[in-house]
Image (cartoon, rainbow, N blue to C red):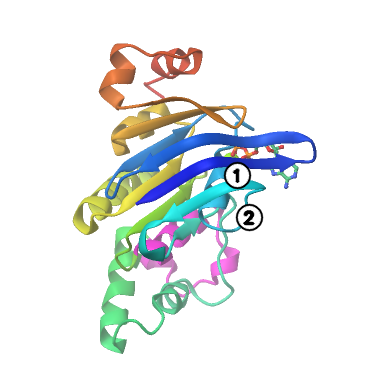
Amino acid sequence: MITLENLKKYAGQRLIVDIDRLHIKEGQRIALLGANGSGKSTLLKLISSVIKPDEGQINIKKEKPVYYMPQQSYGFSSGVYKNILLALGKDFKREERRQMAAAALKQFGLEGLKDKRGDRLSGGETQRLALARLMAAPHDLLLLDEPTGAMDIEAEKAVEKAIVDYCKKNSTTLIMATHSPRQALEIADRLILMHEGSVVEDTSPAKLIESPQSQWGKVFIEHKKF
Ligand SMILES: Nc1ncnc2c1ncn2[C@@H]1O[C@H](COP(=O)(O)OP(=O)(O)OP(=O)(O)O)[C@@H](O)[C@H]1O
Ligand SMILES: [Mg+2]
């Protein structure tokens, strides 16, 4: 579905993303892991065309639209329910849109906030709204940058289940940055570990647990409860 080739992004003189080749198959659920500053967000911005590469190519099958949630998510000033309705656009009939928005409100625990302004929510509520907007409709490709970083543990667990169910139901390809090894194991079927802009390990959860190849892989295993 996505092929990256000789991809390079610089910040001044410094190479912040440097990936020779990476192929992502349709329906894969990928967790992108790595320390602060390892290039996860930059890679997601490149794939979603928020920024352009300095060198190399990103090929996405049939120019599929990419649905992207940035690390700093935001709510629009309209009400929470309307935020979701607006995101559904004109692709669905009015009544269908209402049903989908109501289902998303419920799924992300936003029913009690449905009339509250989207730009006046707490950090975790804002993340739930951003996910509800993206996941109210089925999509082929979802990029999520630390989507539960500000959530309480209960919300986080509910959202993890919602993401897995959504991806399975819609055969969605997912690439998700996370700092939680536990969350990565919960959601992903492929783990990509980054260090200083490059991929240092690209493997399945089972293989990583059995025999991590990189130093970062070993750190991951030590922290897999978190
Ligand atoms: N626009 C920019 N200008 C200069 N440096 C940048 C820019 N964007 C990113 N960087 C640098 O590139 C590196 C990678 O940043 P990135 O945001 O991709 O890291 P990350 O893996 O997402 O980290 P975190 O876990 O903290 O979110 C960092 O060292 C960052 O300071
Ligand atoms: Mg980041």
Q: Which range of residues does the magenta coloring cover?
A: 110-135
| Residue reaching furthest to the right | 12
**Which amino acid type corresponds to the residue marked 1 in the rendered image?**
Thr
Depth check: give the residue in front, 215 or 117: 215
Residue 211 circle label:
none
Q: Are marks 2 and 1 in contact (CB under 8 Å)?
A: yes
Q: Is residue 39 magenta?
A: no
Relative image position of residue 186 (x, y in whole percent): 30, 34
Measuring 19% from the left and 56% from the top, which residue is drawn there?
169
Cβ of disc 1 within 8 Å of ligand 1? Answer: yes
Report if residue 208 is visible in the image: yes
- Ligand 2 is in which quadrant of the figure? top right
Location of residue 96 (image quadrant):
bottom left
**Which amino acid type corresponds to the residue marked 2 in the rendered image?**
Ile
Relative image position of residue 137 (x, y in whole percent): 32, 68
* Residue identified by numbered label 1: 42
* Residue identified by numbered label 2: 51
Residue 93 horizontal side relative to residue 40, left or right: left
Depth check: give the residue in front, 45 or 4: 4
Vertical placement of 70 versus 199: above or below? below
The quadrant in which the C terminus is found is top left
Measuring 48% from the left and 57% from the top, which residue is drawn there?
68
Relative image position of residue 154 (x, y in whole percent): 36, 42
Q: CA distance from mark 2 to mark 1?
A: 8 Å
